Image (cartoon, rainbow, N blue to C red):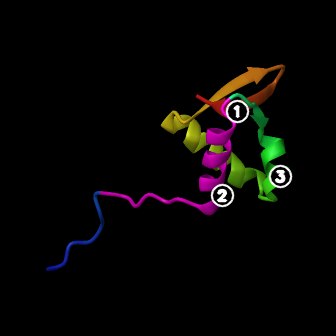
Amino acid sequence: MTNKIGTTTLPTTTSRTSMVLKELFKNNPKTYYTQAELVQEYNKSNPCINKILRTLVEQGVVGRTKVNGRYYYRQK
């Protein structure tokens, strides 16, 4: 085998919905949103929005607060 297979770096994926959510949080830094509200507003699946929110929380862009069993998201 002369060609190497595999990679050491993974590509970063950015979706249009992810960009829209980042803008939403950026433009409304004091507003809290629930995942259900975002699913309904952007007409996306719950797993899609969940994955984007989880990524934004991991990146430190968005904070997550739990109140009575429900999570609220807001820009950090």
Please give the range of residues in magenta.
9-29
Q: Which residue is found at the position 62% from the left and 48% from the top?
A: 23
Among the two numbered marks 3 and 1 on one chain, the one whose residue lies closer to the N terminus? 3
The image quadrant where one finds the N terminus is bottom left
Q: CA distance from mark 2 to mark 3?
A: 11 Å
Q: Is residue 61 left or right of residue 69?
A: left
Q: Position of residue 50 (x, y in %)?
A: 69, 46
Q: Which residue is mark 2?
A: 17
Q: Which residue is mark 3?
A: 41
Residues packed near mark 1 inside 10 Å, few (<14), some (14 to 19) or many (20 plus): some
Among the two numbered marks 1 and 2 on one chain, the one whose residue lies closer to the N terminus? 2
Q: Residue 47 versus residue 23: which sits nearer the camera?
A: 23
Q: Amino acid at mark 3?
A: Glu
Q: Which residue is found at the position 26% from the left and 71% from the top?
A: 5
Q: Amino acid at mark 2?
A: Thr
Q: Amino acid at mark 1?
A: Tyr
Q: Is residue 4 above or below residue 75?
A: below
Residues packed near mark 3 inside 10 Å, few (<14), some (14 to 19) or many (20 plus): few
Q: Residue 47 versus residue 32: which sits nearer the camera?
A: 32
User: Furthest-bottom residue in view?
Assistant: 2
Q: Secondary structure at mark 1?
A: strand
The image quadrant where one finds the C terminus is top right
Residue 64 sits inside the magenta stretch: no
Q: Is residue 29 above or below residue 46?
A: above
Q: Is residue 36 left or right of residue 5?
A: right
Q: Secondary structure at mark 2?
A: helix
User: Furthest-front residue in view?
Assistant: 27
Per the rendering, the mark at residue 73 is 1
Among the two numbered marks 2 and 3 on one chain, the one whose residue lies closer to the N terminus? 2
